[in-house]
Image (cartoon, coloured by chain):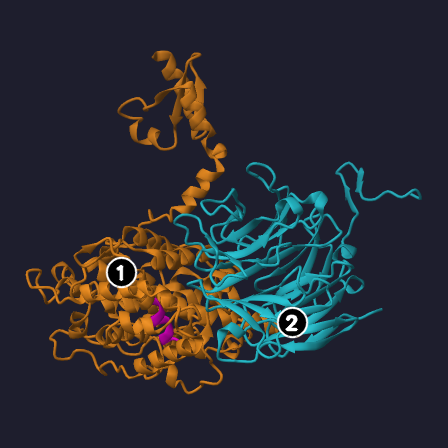
Chain colours: A cyan, B orange
C-alpha cells in the first residue's frame, strides 16, 4: 500500500495553492514562502520567494496561483498589502505591491479567465478589485456602514458567472457581488451564526448553483442553492465537532466536501453531505490544525494539505480512515411480549 | 355570572392555566396557582374574560414562539438581571454606558451566579484571591460577603491556609496571569489538571476559574481607575463622591486644549490615509520604540500616602508572594521563551472564542459581546465637542494596553499611539493596567481633564476589557497547546 508522503517545511504554513497544471504548489506562511514541484511521492523545492525577513510583504496570510498563467502568484499580508509575484523574474520576484487595505488582508482570488483581474478581502471590511496593469485598485466594494472583516472571497467558476464573486464575512452573511456594480451586492443571505469562514462554489457545471459554506463558530458546513432569489434554508447541512476553517468541494464527486478545523481537531474530514453525521473518510496525519488543502483536479483520490505543524502532505484515499466501516448497521430489540424487532440490511441468506 | 363562577371552581382544581369554554365567544383563563391563595377568602378569585384570539395567543405562546423572536431575546444582551446589592457602586458608574452596563450585568450574573462547573462559593473565593493581587479592598469585601452569604465555609476566610489545596493550587496561575500573563506555561496547566483527585482541575473548571481570575484582575483596574469605590462599611455620603466626579477643574475654568489638540491629531492621522507610507521595518521599530519608551514610565512605588485618607491595604491573606509584580514586557527575563503574541496567530475572534465555547460554553457569548461592544462603543463626542470620529483615539488606547502585555497587531502603526496618548496619559493607563493599587489622586487628576465623566469611564472600561482579553488570550493559547500536546501524544 502506498504511504502518504509527509514533507517537513520547518515553518508553520497558512495557505497553499497549486499551479494551473497541478505540477507545482506554493506554500505560504509567516516565515515561509516556497514553491515546490509536486512529484509522485515527494516534493522538490523550486523557488524560495522569502528573500527578506523584516518585510511583511514576504510573510503571507493567503496565497493564490493564477488559474491561467503558470508564472503568476498573489499573496496577502497581515500589514494589508496584496503582492503579485512573477516566477519568471530573475532575482526579486515581486512584480507589484498594492497597499490599499487599512487592516490585514485576509484573502486573494484571481478571475478565472481574465489574467489581469484580482480581488482581495480584508479585515477593513472592503473588497478591492485590481487590474494588474494599473497601480491602484480599480474598484472597491463594501456594504454601507459595514465593519465586518472579510473572511473569504471567490470568483465565479463557470462561464456565465465569471464576473461575479462571492464573499464571506463576520456578519454571518454570504454576499454575491457583480464585478461592475459597487453600490450593493446583487444577492445576499444569512448563512451562519457568527461569521462565515469560507465559501466554495461547486466546480461541476451541472451543479454550478451549489455553494458550500463553512461556519467559523457555529460548527456547520452548509450547502445552498444560491440561484434562488433568497435561499432561506440550506439544502444540506453537516454539523462538525469543531469550528470549521475551510470547506472545499471534492472534484468529480457531486456530494463530497472536505473540511478542516480552526482548533482542537487536526483531521481533514471528507463528508458525503447526504450522510451528514459521520465523515465518509478522515485523514489524521497532521499534528496541529490544518490551515489549507488543495485537490488534485485530475485525480480526485489525491490532495495536498498543509498546517500549523509545518508539514506538507500528499494524501491518497487508499490511506484514509473510514469511520463508517466501524459503524454498527444492525439494531435489534425485544418487546415486553417477546417480539423481536430488527433493523438492518437484509441479505438473501436470512 | 353565577354559572361562570361554578365553572371557575371546577377549573381551579385543574392545572395552573386552564381555559374553560363558557360560550362561543369567550373563554375564561384562571391562574389558579398564584391568585387563588391571596384572594379566595375575601372576594371571588379574579379571572379575565378574553376573546378567542387572545386565548389562542395565550395558550400557544410557549410552543409557537417564532424562532427569530427567540434569537432576538438572546441577542439584546439581556441586562435585565439584577445583581446583588454589593455590586451597586459599580452599577452606578456603569449606568453612564447603558449598553455596556446591560452586557456587563449579564456577564457577571452568568459568571458568578449562573450555570457553571464551580460551586458558587468557590467562584467568589477565587475572585477574592484575584482581588488580593491588587489589594483591592472593595472587591475583596464584595466577594468575602458574597462567599459568606452563599454559605461558604467561614473558616476559609481566615486565609489560603484554611482553604482546600485544590483552590490553593490556583494561586500560581493567579499570580502569573495577573502580572505577567505571557509567561504562563503548558507545564503549569498540566500541574493543575493532571494531578490526582481531589486536587485536580477539570479543563472546564479551570476555564471558569481563570475567567473569574482575569475578570477580577481587570475589575481591580476599573475600581482603582475610577477611584473611591470603597468597601461597603463607608457611609452613603462617602460613597457618593467617586473620585472622578471631584475633578479638580471646575467647568468655568478655560479648557486645557487637550481635547482640541487630540482632535487635530486624529484629523491629521486620517488625512495621511492610514499611515500607508510606513514600511514594515518602520512599523516594527515603532512597536519596539513604544515598548521601550513605555518601560521608562515608572509608576510611583507606593500609593498616595500624603493625600489624606488612604484606605489600609489588605495583607496577603488570599494569595502568596505579593512581591511578584508586572515587569516591562521589553525587559522580561524569559524573552526567548515568551515572544510577542501576534494577534494574527491567535485572536479572540477565532481561536479564543472557539476554545472557551468548547469548554465553558455559557460564557463565550457574553465575553464576545463585551469585547465587541467595548471596541465599537462610541457616542461621537469628546469633551464639549460632538460628531467626532474617535476611532483613532480608541484604537490607540486598546493597542497600547495590549502592547503592555506583548500583544502585537501587524496592521497597526504604533507611532499613532505616541500621537494620541500623552506621556501622563500613558502613565495613567500603564499604572491602571499593571499596578492599579499604586494609582494616586494626583495621577487621576492629571489626565483626561476636559473629558466628560462618562468619557473617562469609557476609557477605563477599555482598559478593563483590553486587559481581560490579554490575560485570556495567553491563557487560552496555552490551553490549546495543552490539548494539542495531549492529542499528539495519543
Q: In this view, does A317 lie to the left or right of A166?
A: right
- Residue at 6% x, 63% y is B253
Residue at the image point whose x is 29% and y is 64% from the top: B393
Residue at point 30% right, 66% down?
B269
Q: Is residue A255 left or right of residue A146?
A: right
In the orientation shown, which residue stands out farthest toward the left?
B252
**Disc number for residue B458:** 1
Q: In the structure shown, which secondary structural element does the residue marked by tag 1 occupy?
A: helix
Image coords of residue A132 (percent x, y): 55, 61
Image: magenta residue range = B398-405
Quick check: B163 above or below A20?
below
- Foreground residue, B47 or A29? A29
Query: In the rendering, at what x and y percent does residue A76 appear?
Result: 53, 66
Determine the image quadrant of residue B2: top left
Relative placement, left or right, of A214 versus B418 is: right
Q: Which mark identifies residue B189?
A: none
Identify which residue, B119 or B285, lies in the foreground. B285
| Distance (Cα) linking label 2 and label 1 | 43 Å
Which residue is denoted by mark 2 in the rendering?
A: A287
Q: Which x, y percent locates residue A190?
A: 51, 44
Q: Is residue B431 above or below residue B376?
A: below
Badge 1 sits on which subunit?
B
Residue B113, magenta (yes or no): no
Look at the image and tell me in which quarter the N terminus of chain B lies. top left
Q: Nearer the viewer, residue B41 or A58?
A: A58
Q: What element carries label 2?
A: loop
Q: Mark 2 lies on which chain?
A: A
Residue B446 at what x, y percent from top left? 16, 72
Amino acid at each position: 500500500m502506498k504511504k502518504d508522503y509527509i514533507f517537513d517545511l520547518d515553518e508553520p504554513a497558512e495557505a497553499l495553492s497549486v499551479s494551473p497544471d497541478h505540477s507545482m504548489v506554493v506554500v505560504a506562511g509567516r516565515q515561509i514562502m516556497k514553491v515546490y514541484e509536486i512529484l509522485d511521492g515527494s516534493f522538490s523545492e523550486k523557488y524560495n520567494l522569502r528573500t527578506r525577513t523584516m518585510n511583511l510583504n514576504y510573510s503571507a496570510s493567503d496565497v493564490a496561483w493564477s488559474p491561467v498563467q503558470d508564472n503568476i502568484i498573489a499573496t496577502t499580508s497581515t500589514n494589508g498589502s496584496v503582492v503579485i509575484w512573477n516566477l519568471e523574474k530573475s532575482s526579486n520576484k515581486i512584480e507589484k505591491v498594492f497597499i490599499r487595505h487599512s487592516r490585514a488582508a485576509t484573502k486573494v482570488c484571481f478571475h478565472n479567465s481574465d489574467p489581469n483581474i484580482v480581488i482581495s478581502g480584508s479585515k477593513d471590511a472592503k473588497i478591492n478589485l485590481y487590474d494588474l496593469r494599473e497601480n491602484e485598485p480599480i474598484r472597491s466594494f463594501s456594504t454601507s456602514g459595514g465593519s465586518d472583516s472579510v473572511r473569504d472571497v471567490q470568483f465565479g467558476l463557470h462561464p456565465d458567472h465569471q464576473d461575479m464573486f462571492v464573499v464571506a464575512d463576520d456578519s454571518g452573511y454570504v454576499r454575491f457581488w457583480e464585478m461592475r456594480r459597487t453600490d450593493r451586492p446583487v444577492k445576499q443571505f444569512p448563512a451562519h451564526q457568527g461569521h462565515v469562514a469560507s465559501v466554495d462554489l461547486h466546480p461541476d457545471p451541472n451543479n454550478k448553483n451549489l455553494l458550500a459554506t463553512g461556519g467559523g463558530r457555529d460548527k456547520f458546513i452548509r450547502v445552498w442553492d444560491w440561484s434562488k432569489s433568497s435561499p432561506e434554508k440550506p439544502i444540506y447541512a453537516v454539523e462538525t465537532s469543531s469550528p470549521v476553517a475551510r470547506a472545499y468541494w471534492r472534484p468529480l464527486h457531486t456530494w463530497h466536501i472536505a473540511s478542516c478545523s480552526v482548533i482542537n481537531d487536526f483531521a481533514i474530514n471528507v463528508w458525503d453531505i447526504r450522510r451528514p453525521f459521520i465523515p465518509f473518510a478522515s485523514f489524521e496525519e497532521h499534528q496541529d490544525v490544518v490551515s489549507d488543502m488543495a485537490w488534485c483536479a485530475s485525480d480526485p483520490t489525491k490532495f495536498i494539505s498543509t498546517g500549523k505543524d509545518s508539514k506538507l502532505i500528499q494524501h491518497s484515499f487508499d490511506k484514509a480512515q473510514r469511520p463508517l466501516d466501524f459503524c454498527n448497521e444492525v439494531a435489534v430489540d425485544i418487546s415486553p411480549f417477546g417480539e423481536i424487532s430488527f433493523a438492518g440490511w437484509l441479505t438473501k441468506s436470512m | 355570572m353565577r354559572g361562570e363562577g361554578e365553572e371557575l371552581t371546577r377549573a381551579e382544581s385543574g392545572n395552573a392555566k386552564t381555559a374553560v369554554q363558557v360560550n362561543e365567544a369567550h373563554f375564561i383563563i384562571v391562574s389558579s396557582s398564584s391568585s387563588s391563595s391571596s384572594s379566595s377568602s375575601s372576594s371571588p378569585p379574579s379571572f379575565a374574560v378574553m376573546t378567542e384570539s387572545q386565548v389562542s395567543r395565550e395558550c400557544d405562546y410557549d410552543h409557537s414562539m417564532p424562532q427569530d423572536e427567540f434569537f432576538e431575546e438572546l441577542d439584546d444582551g439581556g441586562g435585565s438581571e439584577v445583581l446583588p446589592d454589593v455590586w451597586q457602586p459599580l452599577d452606578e458608574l456603569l449606568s453612564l454606558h447603558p449598553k455596556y452596563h446591560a452586557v456587563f450585568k449579564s456577564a457577571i450574573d452568568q459568571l458568578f451566579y449562573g450555570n457553571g462547573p464551580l460551586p458558587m462559593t468557590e467562584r467568589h473565593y477565587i475572585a477574592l484571591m484575584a482581588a488580593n493581587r491588587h489589594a483591592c479592598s472593595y472587591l475583596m469585601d464584595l466577594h468575602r460577603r458574597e462567599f459568606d452569604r452563599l454559605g461558604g465555609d467561614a473558616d476559609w476566610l481566615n486565609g489560603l491556609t484554611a482553604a482546600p489545596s485544590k483552590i490553593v493550587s490556583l494561586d500560581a496561575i493567579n499570580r502569573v496571569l495577573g502580572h505577567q500573563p505571557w509567561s504562563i506555561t503548558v507545564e503549569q496547566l498540566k500541574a493543575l489538571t493532571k494531578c490526582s483527585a481531589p486536587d485536580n482541575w477539570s479543563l472546564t473548571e479551570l476555564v471558569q476559574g481563570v475567567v473569574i481570575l482575569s475578570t477580577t484582575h481587570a475589575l481591580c483596574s476599573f475600581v482603582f481607575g475610577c477611584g473611591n469605590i470603597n468597601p461597603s462599611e463607608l457611609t452613603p455620603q462617602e460613597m457618593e463622591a467617586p473620585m472622578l466626579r471631584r475633578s479638580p477643574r471646575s467647568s468655568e475654568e478655560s479648557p486645557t486644549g487637550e481635547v482640541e489638540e487630540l482632535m487635530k491629531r486624529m484629523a491629521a492621522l486620517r488625512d495621511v490615509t492610514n499611515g500607508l507610507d510606513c514600511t514594515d521595518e518602520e512599523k516594527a521599530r515603532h512597536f519596539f520604540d513604544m515598548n521601550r519608551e513605555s518601560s521608562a514610565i515608572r509608576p510611583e512605588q507606593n500609593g498616595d500616602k500624603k493625600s489624606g485618607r488612604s484606605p489600609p491595604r489588605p495583607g496577603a491573606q488570599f494569595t502568596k508572594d505579593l512581591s511578584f509584580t508586572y515587569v516591562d514586557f521589553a525587559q522580561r527575563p524569559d524573552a526567548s521563551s515568551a515572544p510577542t503574541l501576534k494577534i494574527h496567530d491567535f485572536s479572540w475572534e477565532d481561536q479564543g472564542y472557539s476554545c472557551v465555547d468548547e469548554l465553558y460554553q455559557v460564557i463565550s457569548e457574553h465575553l464576545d459581546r463585551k469585547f465587541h461592544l467595548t471596541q465599537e462603543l462610541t457616542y461621537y463626542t469628546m469633551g464639549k465637542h460632538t460628531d467626532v470620529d474617535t476611532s483613532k483615539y480608541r484604537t490607540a488606547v486598546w493597542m497600547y494596553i495590549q502592547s503592555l502585555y506583548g500583544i502585537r497587531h501587524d496592521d497597526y502603526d504604533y507611532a499613532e499611539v505616541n500621537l494620541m496618548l500623552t506621556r501622563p496619559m500613558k502613565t495613567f493607563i500603564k499604572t491602571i493596567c499593571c499596578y492599579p493599587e499604586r494609582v494616586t489622586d494626583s495621577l487621576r487628576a492629571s489626565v483626561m481633564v476636559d473629558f466628560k465623566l462618562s468619557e473617562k469611564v469609557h476609557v477605563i472600561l477599555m482598559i478593563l476589557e483590553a486587559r481581560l482579553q490579554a490575560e485570556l488570550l495567553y491563557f487560552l493559547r496555552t490551553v490549546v497547546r495543552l490539548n494539542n500536546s495531549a492529542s499528539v501524544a495519543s
